[in-house]
Image (cartoon, rainbow, N blue to C red):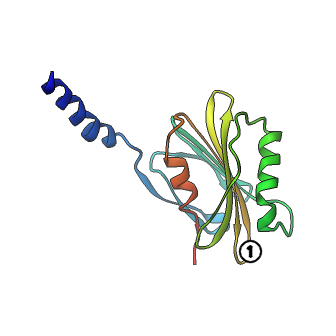
Amino acid sequence: MKQLFFILITFFTVAVPAVAQQLKTTRWDSYGVSFQAPSDLTVEDDSSEGYLAGNDTYYLTIQLLEGEGMKKEELGQELKAIATDDEVTSQSEVQPFELPQFYGAQLKGNCEDDKCIYCYLLAKDGSCGFYVSIIFKQANDKVPETILHSFHLDD
């Protein structure tokens, strides 16, 4: 019995991390923004209209934030409104965060049968802002937050 327990522990500490998503630096050229994303994403659109990419586990949408003069204090309220319009259910509270170049706000919820995370990123220098949504399968998946927290403007 102890041997079986040891084998199971070994499997979950060695084999399971091996199937974890490999992340690589990805760039949305139209707006000079880079972020970490799964290396096997298939890009559907990489234009000034948006950035769309996905695989069997994740679907990533990035768009330029519309609306002039959005303030950092408004991010949460605006994000909640768009998530409600998109019929995101089981919404979490909006969580503000800060990156070296961005002010951010995010919330999690359910998008039909999948999990999703919605985010607004506003450049601290006022140059741009982005709407980001990531649809994913597993409730406790940390990759979507890793993607969000890796955003930066290229020099």
Residue at the image position 32 percent from the left and 37 percent from the top: 16
Where on the picture, by quarter, is residue 147?
Answer: bottom right
For the N terminus, the quadrant is top left
For the C terminus, the quadrant is bottom right
Against 94, residue 74 (above or below) is below
Which structural element holds mark 1?
loop
Q: Where is residue 152 in the image (x, y as percent from the top left)?
A: 58, 68
Against 35, residue 11 (above or below) is above
What amino acid type is highlighted by mark number 1?
Answer: Ser
User: Within 10 angstroms of label 1, few (less than 14), some, or many (20 or more) residues?
Assistant: few
Residue at the image position 21 percent from the left and 36 percent from the top: 10
Q: Residue furthest top?
A: 1
Q: Where is residue 98 in the image (x, y as percent from the top left)?
A: 62, 67
Residue at the image position 38 percent from the left and 43 percent from the top: 20
Against 68, residue 23 (above or below) is above
Whether residue 70 sits left or right of residue 64 in the image: it is right
Q: How many labels does the image show?
A: 1
Q: Where is residue 126 in the image (x, y as percent from the top left)?
A: 75, 75
Whether residue 105 sits left or right of residue 146 in the image: it is right
Residue bearing the label numbered 1 = 127
Q: Residue furthest right?
A: 68
Q: Nearer the viewer, residue 105 or 48?
A: 105
Where on the picture, by quarter, is residue 124?
Answer: bottom right
Residue at the image position 67 percent from the left and 38 percent from the top: 109
Against 109, residue 127 (above or below) is below
Q: Where is residue 121 in the image (x, y as percent from the top left)?
A: 69, 62
Q: Residue furthest left?
A: 3
Q: Nearer the viewer, residue 155 or 95?
A: 95
